[in-house]
C-alpha cells in the first residue's frame, strides 16, 4: 500500500477527537483535489489564453462548485468550501481540455489530499528561463487583456 502523506501528518500517531480531526482535515474528514497540466500551441495569444481560462472557469469549474489554484498551464483543482473533487470532476476537466483546439497536450489527476500532499509527489516543474523584464512584460500583457489584477509575489 502506498504511503499517504496525511497519514503521517499532524500528529497522526496521537488519538485525536472527532472535532480536531475535522478541524485538521485528517482521517474521515480528508478532502481531495487533483492537478492538471496542459501545453498550449505556441501561437496562442494572451487574449486567447485569457479567453480559455475564463471559459474553463465558467463552463466547468463554477457549475461543479470547484475552485482553481494556478493557471491554464498548471493548476490544482479542489472543491469550493468543504468537500472533495470527484472522479467525475476530473473527467469533466479532461473532456473540456480534449475539446480545445489550442491545447496540444494535457494530463489530469490523480486525486490527492488537498491539505497534506506529499511534496515528493509534486514533480519539479521546469519553466522556460525568463528575465525579470520578460516576466513583468507578460504580467502586464495579461493584466491588459484580461482586465484582472495579476501580481507577482504578494497581493495588493
Image (spheres, helix red, strand yellow):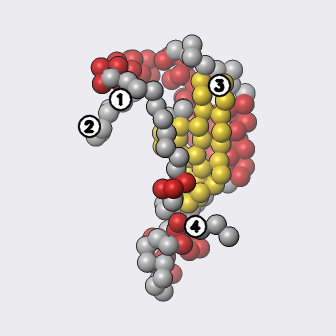
Disc assigned to residue 4:
4
Mark-to-mark CA distance, 3 and 4: 32 Å
| Mark in the foreground, 2 or 4 | 4
Mark-to-mark CA distance, 2 and 4: 36 Å
Residue located 56% across and 60% down the image: 113
Residue located 53% across and 46% down the image: 123
Mark 4, secondary structure of its residue: loop
Write down the residue under mark 1. 149
**How many numbered callouts?**
4
Mark 2, secondary structure of its residue: loop
In the rendered structure, are the residues bearing label 3 and label 4 in contact, judged by CB atoms less than 8 Å apart?
no
Write down the residue under mark 3. 103
In the rendered structure, are the residues bearing label 3 and label 2 in contact, judged by CB atoms less than 8 Å apart?
no
Vertical relation: 30 (above or below) 11: above
Residue located 43% across and 73% down the image: 10
Write down the residue under mark 2. 156
In the rendered structure, are the residues bearing label 1 and label 2 in contact, judged by CB atoms less than 8 Å apart?
yes
Mark-to-mark CA distance, 3 and 2: 32 Å
Mark 1, secondary structure of its residue: loop
Vertical relation: 150 (above or below) 87: above
Mark-to-mark CA distance, 1 and 3: 25 Å
Residue located 58% across and 46% down the image: 35
In the rendered structure, are the residues bearing label 1 and label 4 in contact, judged by CB atoms less than 8 Å apart?
no
- Residue 141: image quadrant is top left
Mark-to-mark CA distance, 1 and 2: 9 Å
| Residue 79 seen from this side | no
Left/right placement of residue 66 relative to residue 119 reads right
Amino acid at each position: 500500500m502506498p504511503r499517504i502523506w496525511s497519514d503521517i501528518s499532524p500528529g497522526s500517531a496521537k488519538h485525536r477527537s472527532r472535532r480536531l480531526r475535522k478541524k485538521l482535515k485528517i482521517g474521515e474528514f480528508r478532502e481531495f483535489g487533483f492537478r492538471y497540466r496542459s501545453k498550449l500551441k505556441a501561437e496562442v495569444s494572451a487574449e486567447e489564453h485569457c479567453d480559455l481560462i475564463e471559459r474553463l472557469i465558467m463552463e466547468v469549474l463554477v457549475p461543479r462548485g470547484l475552485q482553481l489554484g494556478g493557471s491554464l498551464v498548471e493548476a490544482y483543482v479542489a472543491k469550493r468550501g468543504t468537500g472533495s473533487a470527484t472522479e467525475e470532476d476530473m473527467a469533466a476537466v479532461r473532456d473540456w481540455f480534449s475539446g480545445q483546439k489550442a491545447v496540444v497536450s494535457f494530463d489530469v489527476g490523480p486525486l490527492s489530499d488537498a491539505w497534506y500532499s506529499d511534496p515528493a509527489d509534486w514533480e519539479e516543474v521546469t519553466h522556460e528561463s525568463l528575465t525579470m523584464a520578460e516576466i513583468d512584460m507578460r504580467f502586464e500583457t495579461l493584466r491588459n487583456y484580461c482586465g484582472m489584477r495579476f501580481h507577482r509575489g504578494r497581493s495588493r
